[in-house]
């Protein structure tokens, strides 16, 4: 007769510990978001990375991983993730906005201005567009001042 299942007799298997070919990307993505909401950043990062390995074109996973890395002060890695999100989904406007913002924070004004323009070409009316316009003007001013 088999022993009844209990938490003490079976080890916990998390989706991001499974081989990539077995884990659908949604499982580690959802797990990563849940872990992040519970303040478990290390595990959340591992889960989100598993989602991007399972599907390198999973733009939302790259986006969420970028946000998590930026929270930790790892802005260059966050920028890299946003670039990957945009390679997977070039029209992902939230990724365009965040990439422009991170580039601006890193004083990469010319590149940030390009992404602010791209954002405004898609969204010219929202409250986010107003912020994008202000940021674009700031980046253009910084470019002008550095050229002077």
Image: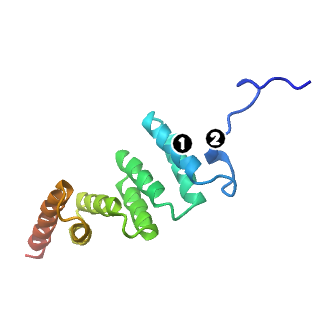
Figure quadrant of the C terminus: bottom left
Residue at image coords 53%, 53%:
49
Q: Position of residue 127 (x, y in %)?
A: 17, 54
- Left or right placement of residue 52 versus residue 15 in this view: left
Q: What number is the disc on residue 14?
A: 2
Quarter of the N terminus within the rendering: top right
Vertical relation: 78 (above or below) 111: above
Query: Residue drawn at (36%, 50%), measured in percent from left and top?
Result: 70
**Total residue callouts:** 2
Coordinates of residue 80 in the picture (x, y in percent):
41, 62
* Mark 2: secondary structure: loop
Q: Quadrant of residue 89?
A: bottom left
67 relative position to 138: left or right: right
Query: For mark 1, does the 10 Å Cα neighbourhood hold few (<14), some (14 to 19), or many (20 or more) residues?
Result: many
Q: Earlier in the sequence, mark 1 or mark 2?
A: 2
Q: Nearer the viewer, residue 110 or 21?
A: 21
Label pair 1/2, CB-CB below 8 angstroms: yes
Evaluate whether residue 41 shows in this view: no
- Badge 2, how many Cα within 10 Å: few under 14, some, many 20+? few
As displayed, is residue 125 above or below residue 70?
A: below
Residue 7 percent across, percent down from the top left: 70, 25
Q: Residue furthest right?
A: 1
| Residue 139 image-quadrant placement | bottom left
Residue carrying label 1? 31
- Seen at 43% across and 60% down, the residue is 81
Could you tell me if residue 86 is visible in this image?
A: yes
Q: Nearest the camera: 82 or 127?
A: 127
Q: Is residue 118 above or below residue 94?
A: below
Residue 115: percent from left, percent from top: 27, 68
Q: Secondary structure at mark 1?
A: helix
């Amino acid at each position: 007769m088999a022993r009844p299942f209990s938490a003490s007799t079976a080890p916990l298997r998390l989706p991001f510990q499974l081989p990539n070919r077995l884990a659908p990307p949604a499982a580690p993505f959802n797990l990563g978001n849940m872990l992040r909401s519970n303040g478990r950043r290390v595990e959340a990062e591992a889960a989100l990375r598993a989602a991007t390995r399972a599907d390198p074109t999973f733009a939302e996973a790259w986006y969420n991983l970028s946000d998590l890395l930026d929270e930790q002060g790892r802005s260059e890695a966050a920028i890299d993730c946003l670039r990957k999100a945009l390679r997977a989904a070039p029209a992902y406007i939230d990724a365009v906005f965040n990439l422009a913002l991170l580039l601006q924070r890193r004083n990469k004004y010319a590149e940030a201005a390009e992404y602010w323009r791209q954002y405004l070409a898609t969204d010219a009316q929202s409250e986010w567009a107003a912020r994008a316009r202000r940021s674009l003007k700031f980046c253009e001013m910084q470019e002008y001042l550095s050229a002077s």
